[in-house]
């Protein structure tokens, strides 16, 4: 079943109206017709609105609301990914897969070992493209919300932004050399103690990883370094590994 996002004002007690670029996609690409069923979300309340298409015009698709699925697909936690800017188009891949896995917000972070340097103009153009990728991934995975891709932050800004979150995780390939290193047992303990309703910050370094001073700054801010195992993971793999563990731990739990 095809899934679309609309503004909350487009959903009433009995009908849903789709406008914008999705109209052309529904009419000329998917070639849907009156009577076909689609699902719609407003990107806010996490609900899935099941609709039947009534009328397709050049400017809008009018649907009849059939029922509302209250138990949406969202995880019962709010996970924010702080991703060190990777090279090439890796950020696009990271955004797509992390949205599919359930992340709520993605913050690109300029770290010391980042090769990519974006000026304000390039950063805004990139952010707009990244937001489009997040929306497409949310549609594909039938998310109830569209995760927000924020403006690029400095490392210090990212630490401050994450400061109020309940759990703050920093996967670090050299975790074993830190004072109090707990290895995989420590990682299992952190993941195992996650609970519904929490906000979780996950910091992922760029190619080349974090500098020691960045890890020290994170620890000074109360963040928890963890290991992801004995193998060195690529930057685009590390975040997905953490997110998969979080999903496994919390999928199906109640957020109330």
Image (tube, rainbow, N blue to C red):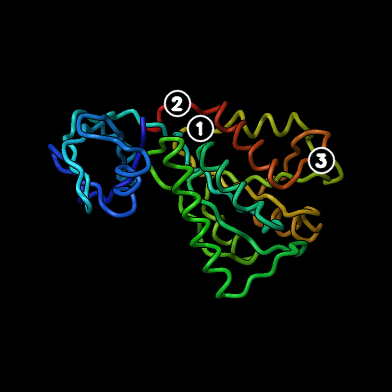
Q: Quadrant of the N terminus?
A: top left
Q: Residue sitting at 78 percent across and 33 percent down?
A: 229
Image coordinates for residue 46, horizontal then vertical, percent? 34, 39
Vertically, is 51 above or below 12?
A: above
Q: Residues within 10 Å of mark 2 (few under 14, many from 20)?
A: few
> With respect to residue 176, does 129 lie above or below?
below
The residue singled out by tag 2 in the image is 253
* Image-quadrant location for residue 70: top left
In the current view of this chain or complex, which residue is farthest to the right? 177
- Label 2: which secondary element: loop
Query: Which mark identifies residue 185?
Result: none
What element does badge 1 sit on? Answer: loop
Residue located beneath label 1 in the image: 195
Residue corresponding to mark 3 = 232
Query: In screen coordinates, is 67 left or right of 227?
Result: left
- Earlier sequence position, callout 2 versus callout 3: 3
* N-term mark: 1 or 3: 1
CA–CA distance in space, label 2 to label 3? 31 Å
Disc 1 to disc 2, C-alpha distance: 8 Å
Which one is earlier in the sequence, the residue at label 1 or at label 2?
Answer: 1
| Displayed quadrant of residue 53 | top left
Q: Label 3 crowding class (10 Å Cα cut-off): few <14, some 14-19, many 20+?
A: some
């Amino acid at each position: 079943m095809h899934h679309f996002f609309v503004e909350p004002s487009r959903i009433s007690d009995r009908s849903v109206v789709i406008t914008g670029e999705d109209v052309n996609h529904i009419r000329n690409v998917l070639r849907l017709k009156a009577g076909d069923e689609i699902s719609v979300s407003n990107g806010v309340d996490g609900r899935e609105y099941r609709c039947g298409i009534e009328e397709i015009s050049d400017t809008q698709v009018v649907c009849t609301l059939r029922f509302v699925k209250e138990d949406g697909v969202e995880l019962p936690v709010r996970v924010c990914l702080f991703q060190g800017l990777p090279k090439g188009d890796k950020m696009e891949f990271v955004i797509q897969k992390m949205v599919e896995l359930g992340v709520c917000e993605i913050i690109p972070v300029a770290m010391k070992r980042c090769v990519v340097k974006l000026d304000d103009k390039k950063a805004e153009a990139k952010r707009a493209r990244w937001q489009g990728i997040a929306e497409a991934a949310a549609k594909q995975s039938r998310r109830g919300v569209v995760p927000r891709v924020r403006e690029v932050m400095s490392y210090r800004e990212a630490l401050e932004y994450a400061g109020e979150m309940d759990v703050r995780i920093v996967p670090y390939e050299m975790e074993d050399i830190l004072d109090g290193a707990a290895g995989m047992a420590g990682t299992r303990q952190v993941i195992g103690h996650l609970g519904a309703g929490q906000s979780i910050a996950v910091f992922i370094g760029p190619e080349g990883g974090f500098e020691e001073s960045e890890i020290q700054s994170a620890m000074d801010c109360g963040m928890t370094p963890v290991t992801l195992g004995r193998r060195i993971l690529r930057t685009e793999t590390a975040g997905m590994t953490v997110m998969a563990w979080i999903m496994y731990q919390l999928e199906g739990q109640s957020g109330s």
